[in-house]
Amino acid sequence: MNIPDNKTAIKLLKRFENPIHIIRHCVRVKDVSTFLSERLCKKGVHLNKDLVRAGALLHDISKYRSIVSGGDHAIMGGKILEEMGYGEVAQIVVCHVHISRSLLESGNINEALIVNYADKRVKHTEVVSLRERFEDLLKRYGLDESRRKMIRSIYRESRQMEDLIFSRLDIGPDDLTQNFRRKSQCQSQIL
């Protein structure tokens, strides 16, 4: 399995001209994904933590390109990573916007589900509730009823992911938000 390390992943994000705010978002999604995967592994869920980390860092590798030229950034990113020999990471990137119904219904937790969910909890670089994140998505991207319907559908999927993930943990979704708020406050005091 070919999985890029953090340094390589950041170089790739820069190579594809992603601005610093997108890179910071990817780093925060990696932080949340790592936090969740470490706790889930301790509870007996089998996850490849390196794959989670790399998938989270690279989930928006083609975000800037899709903004500039159009297209589905998840599919574009998956194609880029597949061509570079990162096939397993590519599969996570392709699934980071929409998770398959069959996976949700299976009750299984895998690396793609963790990255997808973590992305839904990070608004820019702040860890927020699903409700807050999706209210923001509706404001920014809900330009017509078709898009609003799609965003609401993804919200329902995200709630299912949240229920599945936290049913295996001894913390709740609000604890995740609080944990990262405390970390952000400590970091800002140090700077």
Image (cartoon, rainbow, N blue to C red):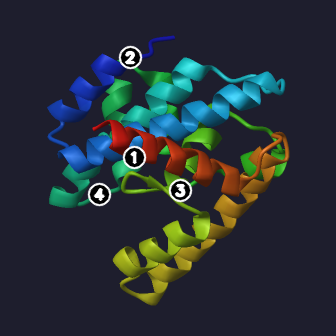
From the viewer's perspective, tell me whether residue 50 is left or right of residue 108.
left
Q: Amino acid at mark 2?
A: Pro
Most foreground residue, 1 or 19? 19
Circles 2 and 1 in contact, beta carbons < 8 Å: no
Spatial distance from mark 2 to mark 3, Cα to Cα?
A: 23 Å
| Mark positioned earlier in the residue sequence (3 or 4) | 4
Q: In the visual, does 167 lie left or right of 125?
A: right
**Which residue bears the numbered disc 1?**
75
Q: Quadrant of residue 28?
A: top left
Mark 1 vs mark 3, CA separation in Å: 18 Å
Q: Secondary structure at mark 3?
A: helix
In three-dimensional space, the C-alpha distance between marks 2 and 4, rounded to whole angstroms, equals 25 Å
Q: Which mark is residue 71?
A: 4
| Mark 1, secondary structure of its residue | helix
Question: In the image, residue 83 lies at what x, y percent?
Answer: 32, 25
- Give the x, y percent position of residue 152: 58, 76
Q: Residue furthest top?
A: 1
Give the residue pinned by disc 3. 120
Tell whether label 4 touches label 2 (CB within 8 Å).
no
Residue 73: x %, y % from top left: 34, 51
Q: Earlier in the sequence, mark 2 or mark 4?
A: 2
Q: Residue at x 49, y 81 (%)?
A: 148
Q: Quadrant of residue 48?
A: top right
Q: Residue furthest front?
A: 189
